[in-house]
Amino acid sequence: MPRTLSEEDIAEFREQLCAAASRLFAQRGTDGVTMRALAEIMGISPMKPYHYFRDKEEILAAAMERAFNRFVAALEAAENTAAPALERANARRQAYVAFALAEPDCYRVMFELPHPDTAKYPGLQAAMDRARAVTRRGMDALIASGLIEGDPVVLGNVFWCALHGAVSAYIAGKLDSREQLEAILDISMKSLREGLKPAAR
């Protein structure tokens, strides 16, 4: 007689499947992943994933939601301090880099793959909104401290593009060392802050 699965059993399997899916999506892209391939790498029957997810898109959305929530938890932990805005910004940067290098599959799934329609996946939308909120708080704090000025949403994207570009280059093996990555980020972040200083009045 089949064993009745508890909520913990179901959550554990979904976690395992999302972790495996993240590896495959990161390696092969969305078109290169099938339900059968996921089942094969997990050593389960081809039909088992369908007991937990409707289709590949739902697995992708769940893998992205998992990745964003893990990523944001790391950033939130780094900013949970009463330190000045610039120190918190540096702590978030270090947490960002540490997460990306420790979990490159999650990082690629979040930022290199097309997102499913988030209207169909409110959990993914909530996780993405949580990530944007961290960035917005950081920009608001830097602006309030008089270190930069401008639209906080635009500024958040500017800083993220600089950070993401360098981190992605490192993950792809295009930089010589971790030290080079940190040097590039030091220069990039400092240059952006200098260029975005409020004009003298």
Image: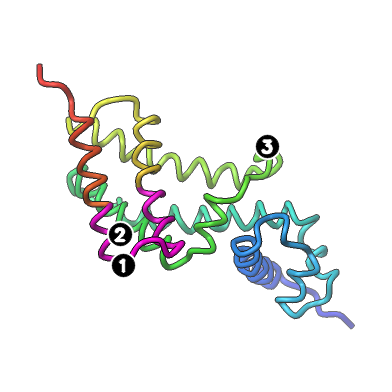
Which residue is depicted at the point 64% across and 42% down?
122
Q: Is residue 196 above or below residue 132?
A: above
Mark 1 closeness class: few <14, some 14–19, many ≥20 residues within 10 Å? few
Crowding at mark 2 (Cα within 10 Å: few <14, some 14-19, many 20+): some
The amino acid marked with disc number 2 is: Leu
Which residue in the protein does label 1 denote?
177
SS at circle 2: helix
Residue at mark 3: 119
- Above or below 54: residue 195: above
> Where the N terminus falls, by quadrant?
bottom right
Is 50 in front, or is 190?
190
Q: Quadrant of the C terminus?
A: top left
Q: Which residues are magenta?
A: 163-184
Rendered image quadrant of residue 9: bottom right
Q: Nearer the viewer, mark 2 or mark 3?
A: 2
Residue 75 vs 191, above or below: the answer is below
Q: Position of residue 72 (x, y in %)?
A: 44, 52
Q: Which residue is mark 2?
A: 181
Q: Decide: marks 2, 3 in contact (CB < 8 A)?
A: no
* Side of 14 relative to 142 (left or right): right
Quadrant in which residue 36 is drawn: bottom right
Q: Secondary structure of the magenta portion, mostly? A: helix
Q: What is the residue that sits farthest to the bottom in this orientation? A: 1
Mark 1 touches mark 3? (CB < 8 Å) = no
- Determine the residue located farthest toward the top in the rendered image: 201
The numbered mark, 1 or 3, whose residue comes first in the sequence reads 3
